Amino acid sequence: MRKFSIPRAFTVKKAAKYLLIIVCMTLFNFALPQREPLAFALFYAALCCGLDPFVLAGGYLISSAAALSLTATLACAIQSAFLLLVFTLYKHFGRKMKIERALYCVLCMLPVVFLYPHTGYALFPLPLLAQKAIIAVFLFLLSMLSEGGLHALLFRAFRCRLTAGELAQIGLMWLATGLGIYGALGIHAFTLVSAFALLSAVTLLKSAAALPFAVALSLPLCVRDASLLPLAEYAVYACVALLFIPYGRYVSALGFLAVFLGASYLHGVYSADVWDIVFTVFSCAVPAIAVCCMPEKLWRKTKHSLLFYRERALPRIAINRNRRAVGEQLYEVSSLFREIENAFGEREQPDRTGEQICQRLMETMCTACPNRRKCERAHVEDGMQKLIAVGKAKGRVNLIDLPVELSSHCENSAGLLFTLNKQLAEYNRYIAETESARAGRRLLAEQAHGISEILRRIALEQSEEYSFSEEENVLSAALASAGILSTEIFLYGEDENFTVSVTLESDVNGKDLCAVAGNALHVPLSLAEKIPLTNDRACYILKRKANYDAAFGIASRAKDGREASGDTHSILKIDERRFLVALSDGMGSGEEARSVSDRTLSLFESFYKAKMPSETVLTAVNQLITYSSEETFSCLDLAAVDLDTGCADVVKIGSPVGFLLSDDELKLLEGESLPIGMLEAVHPATMRVTMKENDFLIFMSDGVTSAFGSSSDLCAYLSGLHPLNPQSLAEEILKNAVGRYGERADDDMTVLTVKLTKTA
């Protein structure tokens, strides 16, 4: 027979819950001087929350012993028996108790009015029965409010954000419990419990939210002593603990202990008897030690449960859900373009055009020839295959191309050559059309591949979820200590994508903000964007600062007699961490050459800004330029630089030598490819170099390099330079080149320089 058992952890947890409720009911009965049965409020609230009525009824009877009266116990027994019967019947018949439960609560007040022993309060000159009726009304209201407070504690606390009403109801329950602790166990027990609660709140919240919590803790003392002094004292305790909490919970507990002992001196505690001093020190030292000794893992777990009190989870959940949906859709679209790439991709097919030409040639020339049988025995067909192969390679054939098999046996060689050349012409036209179609398909396939890669990368970025971050509280505290008040903080992303979004006053200095945030998060930050929200508030977006910064220099001069230079340069920010520099030299000079350069650079900029793969960019731009113009070409120097690593991908197409100038060496960057647009299949010279701090990247058009006569002279000149900034370097090189021409420009001349510096 299979045995079923209740998990032990569940049993212990349930037993602890009921035991705590029974203890609180007992304490409730000590809240008022004449031990009025305030425990009924908690008993009734627990029944309404669905807890076991038999256990609660027994606990309520036990708590009634606080009155030390058989009559009081009898009144409580009548109340518990009545409610036990009512709630048991409702549960038996499967009915849900509604508003009528308030009526049952009113009926339970009758034993309080007519049976509960009460001598009355001299402070209120009212008949005893009237005083007991007032107590019954107060107990009824306390029962109604305790129902909501206990429900919030049992089913909503640590699961969601409590409403202001629920917090007020819980505060009222604490008032009764605190008065009960004071009345039953004395001021030292109350201090021990409230001090532990205060230090725990400071350790968990680490914010001004602990201050109203401390005020609520002081309310039982305020009511008991009819004074607001305890409220001020507990507020000071909370402020001191919060002041030291950035240095750890040990320092915070020590600061609280020092202030509490100092306040005790002002109350004259140290002039009392020894035991009173010992208990006072004990009541504040034990909570401080307990908070310090509790494991960090337990604090983290509890803090995680309190996230809903500090954060609004639903917006992030909605954002993450939308990001996942967008990411999934982008993946699907990426797969679609991958299929398009496969559909238009190259397929290797056997070349059988030689066999087809041979067959058509024999049908045309050999079918009616009387020497056909003789030629077949002499294997003339093999000779035709050789001749066709030569014709495919040369484009046409003549008499000197005839192989021996044909020249010695074919009697109509002239007609054969004429017919074959005609078929070869058709074949060449077919090949040209086929190659054009193939180039178009290849271009479409490459573009589909590039778009697929872009969409796939965006899908990966969009699929990253935004989660809660403890660093947001750290940043909030750091900004507050710097006098910068933030209403919202949002951290997301990792590594180079790390982003901080914070809502502040519009007049906050961006550099100061980055400095404070960077020190708090231990990440170098820079202001990426400032978005106005209202007239006086804005959203500041901070990004992780790159390791390097870049400065640029450009010097240019058009050919004498021309208004426009055919050289074009470009400096493009791809994203926060990469930039693109390019120098394009259109063949010739003037407006036409400049148009080619502009068009080439514009295409490159658009492709790189869309983050198209580099290998796709080169072939696509080359084919597009080729299709758009027949006889205009462009030389190109291009570098995509990563500001995190200093790594530069350099592309040179038909351009003169470039240079990487460091303090200790001069490195040449050379390429041997033809200008872009000259041939459909360009093979650019690509290289990867790593730039260091204070390195200079130098690109020059051929008008500048030609002025120096040779690369050796140019290298010797550059090696002797010790530049400080890129602009002065570009101007110096151009000035020297013009001087070598005799102070005139025989060609368009442009110098583009880039310098990397370490970020501050």
Image (cartoon, rainbow, N blue to C red):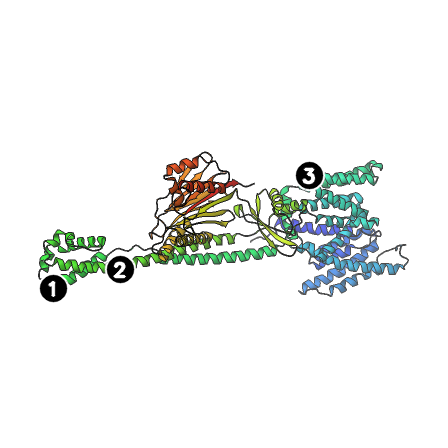
Q: Amino acid at mark 2?
A: Tyr
Mark 3 or 2, closer to the camera: 2
User: Which label belongs to residue 44?
Assistant: none
Lateral position of residue 528 relative to residue 26, left or right: left
Q: CA distance from mark 2 to mark 1?
A: 28 Å
Q: Position of residue 157 (x, y in %)?
A: 67, 53
Residue 112 is situated, as x and y percent measured from the top left of the image, at 82, 59
Q: Residue 368 shows which numbered tag?
A: 1
Residue labelled with disc 3 = 250
The residue under the point 8% across, 62% down is 370
Report the Cα–Cα distance between label 3 and label 2. 87 Å
Tell which of 539 and 721 is nearer to you. Answer: 721
> Which residue is the site of mark 2?
430
How many neighbours does mark 1 have within 10 angstroms: few (below 14), some (14-19), or many (20 or more)? few
Q: Is residue 262 left or right of residue 728?
A: right
Image coordinates for residue 615, horizontal then vertical, percent: 39, 50
Q: Confirm or deny contact between disc 3 and disc 1 (CB under 8 A).
A: no
Which numbered mark, 3 or 1, is in the foreground of this view? 1
In front of the other: 650 or 323: 650
Q: Is residue 549 above or below residue 170?
A: above
- Quadrant into which the N terminus falls: bottom right
The C terminus: image quadrant: top right
- Label 1's element? loop
The amino acid marked with disc number 1 is Ala
